[in-house]
Amino acid sequence: MTVTIYHNPACGTSRNTLAMIRNAGIKPTVIEYLSTPPDRQTLQAMIRDAGLTVREAIREKGTPYAELALADPSLTDDQLLDAMLAHPILINRPFVVTALGVRLCRPSELVLDILLAPQQGAFTKEDGEAVIDAQGRRIQ
């Protein structure tokens, strides 16, 4: 199964998502999008395929969102995409692309919905929250 994660190694949610992909025995393609951002067409497709609006795909915290006045409701999707491409930190993360679909994995366990391979063992997030039990089953 081909899996691509648009990853920020400084983000705990992104690290947890990547770890769950690997816990399924998958070796994903890891794109550190801050240094290698997606092109416009790829970004638009990911947002659309994840069922999001462009606004829903923008990260506000720790970004120049306020400084760029991106909350202005008169801004078009094209203008918001321009800002995201000029400042990749504005792209919310992590986006994961698989044959089963695309998800913005916030929370990180949303990745489980689009992985064909089962989890191979227990998994606990960095914050101590158990997500997968020893038999590889999701803890509800």
Image (cartoon, rainbow, N blue to C red):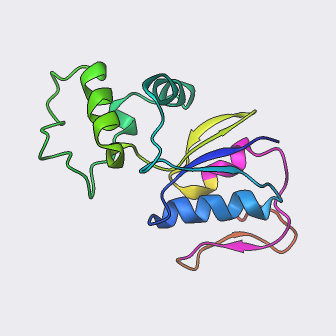
Q: As displayed, is residue 108 above or below residue 66?
A: below
Image position, residue 123 (x, y; %): 72, 71
Q: Nearer the viewer, residue 100 or 6?
A: 6
Q: Is residue 13 above or below residue 86?
A: below
Q: Quadrant of residue 4?
A: top right
Q: Position of residue 128 (x, y in %)?
A: 58, 80
* Residue 101, placed above or below residue 25: above
**Residue 122, magenta (yes or no):** yes
Q: Residue at x 29, y 43 (%)?
A: 87
Query: Is 79 placed above or below 130 here?
Result: above
Judged from this view, the residue extending furthest toward the front is 35
Q: Please state the extent of the stretch shown in magenta in the rendering.
A: 110-126
Label total for image: 0
Q: Residue at x 18, y 36 (%)?
A: 70
- Is residue 140 shown to the viewer in this render? no
Quadrant position of the N terminus in the picture: top right
Q: Classify residue 49 as left or right of residue 40.
A: right
Left or right of residue 67: residue 26: right
Q: Is residue 4 left or right of residue 74?
A: right
Residue 15 position within the rendered picture, expressed as x and y whole percent measured from the top left: 56, 65
Residue pictured at 62% horizontal, 56% vertical = 109
Q: Residue, x 27% and y 56% (percent of image)?
A: 61
Give the x, y percent position of residue 115.
Answer: 76, 46
Res 62 seen here: yes
Residue 76, picture quadrant = top left
Q: Quadrant of the C terminus?
A: bottom right
